[in-house]
Image (cartoon, rainbow, N blue to C red):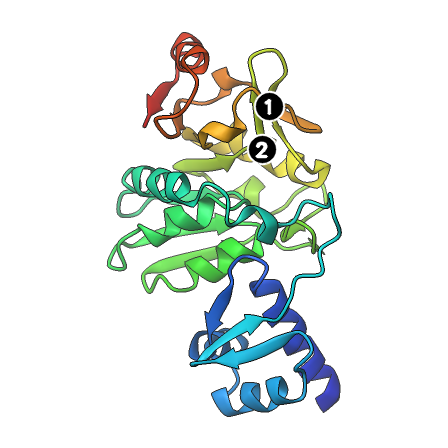
């Protein structure tokens, strides 16, 4: 690959990483890209319209997302405290030797944050923002579901009949949702997420739904499950009472 093409590819990957977070340390990004920090500094010095280096951190200058277009970055700053609490609660379920599927979304990275560095486990993921978080866990064996990369929601989609997930036996499926309705079930924004979500729900021994209170009594475009498909629902204390009752009635355990 020509030098300029390599640089363009590196800059593209940096921008993708920054859709999940406002900044990433230069050292961390260099390690992920397998290049020197000096190489990244040179790249950034010639690409000042969109990225800049501040105090050792790479940051975006602006976000050019189109109005109404769902992107990970747009959702990342909403209900952060609730998501952090959900992440801490969910991480507590993971035991040494477990194999865990981590879904896409903005709550899932908080789960990874609270997994102890010394814990040995296997992670399966199909999302770039989650992959970047998992790569920081020294005792985590990472399995990535490859395929076509969808920039909008940071998801890899494999359209073949069989894939990695078919051959993995999951201890846990940590699944996120954009909408939960008593009448219309559990939904997400994008149809390219549905197949993987449904497959991991079939494959996993334990199925856990991650959703802050804002997701309840909401319906999004793509249906993938119902409340009774989960054994655990991890949320926050602002969840509406009607849904507390509905979760209990479905046979799931509500964790708040």
Residue drawn at 63 percent across, 53 percent down: 154
Per the image, label 2 sits on a secondary structure element best described as: loop
**In the displayed structure, would residue 122 be above or below residue 176?**
below
Q: Answer with the quarter of the image where residue 208 lies.
A: top left
Q: Nearer the viewer, mark 1 or mark 2?
A: 1
User: Where does label 1 land, which residue?
Assistant: 218
Question: Which residue is at the front of the view, 219 or 145?
Answer: 219
Residue 1 visible at all:
no
Residue displayed at 47% across by 32% down: 211
Where in the figure is residue 35, as x and y percent of width and height? 53, 85
Where residue 63 appears, as percent x and y from the top left, is 66, 61
Say whether disc 1 or disc 2 marks the residue closer to the N-terminus. Answer: 2
Relative to 155, does residue 216 appear above or below in the rendering?
above
Q: Nearer the viewer, residue 165 or 152?
A: 152
At horizontal 60% and vertical 23% (from top left) the residue drawn is 218
Mark 1 crowdedness (10 Å alpha carbons): few <14, some 14-19, many ≥20: some
Instruction: For the C terminus, give its image quadrant.
Output: top left
Instruction: Tell me the tag on residue 178.
Output: 2
Q: Which element is circle 1 on?
A: loop
Marks 1/2 in contact by CB < 8 Å: the verdict is: yes
């Amino acid at each position: 690959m020509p030098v300029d093409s390599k640089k363009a590819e590196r800059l593209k990957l940096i921008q993708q990483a920054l859709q999940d977070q406002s900044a990433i340390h230069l050292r961390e990004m260099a390690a992920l890209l397998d290049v020197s920090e000096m190489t990244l500094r040179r790249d950034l010095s010639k690409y000042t319209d969109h990225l800049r280096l501040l105090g050792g951190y790479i940051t975006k200058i602006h976000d050019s997302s189109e109005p109404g277009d769902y992107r990970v970055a747009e959702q990342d700053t909403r209900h952060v405290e609730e998501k952090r609490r959900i992440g801490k609660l969910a991480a507590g379920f993971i035991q040494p030797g477990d194999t865990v599927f981590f879904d896409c979304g903005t709550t899932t990275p908080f789960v990874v944050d609270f997994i102890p560095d010394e814990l040995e486990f296997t992670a399966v993921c199909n999302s770039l923002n989650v992959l970047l978080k998992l790569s920081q866990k020294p005792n985590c064996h990472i399995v990535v579901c490859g395929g076509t990369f969808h920039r909008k929601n940071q998801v890899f989609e494999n359209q073949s009949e069989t894939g990695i997930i078919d051959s993995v036996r999951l201890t846990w499926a940590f699944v996120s949702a954009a909408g939960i309705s008593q009448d219309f079930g559990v939904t997400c924004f994008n149809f390219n997420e549905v197949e993987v979500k449904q497959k991991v729900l079939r494959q996993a021994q334990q199925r856990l739904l991650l959703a802050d209170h804002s997701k309840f009594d909401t319906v999004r475009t793509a249906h993938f499950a119902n409340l009774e498909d989960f054994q655990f629902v991890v949320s926050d204390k602002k969840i509406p009472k009607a849904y507390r009752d509905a979760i209990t009635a479905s046979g799931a355990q509500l964790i708040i």
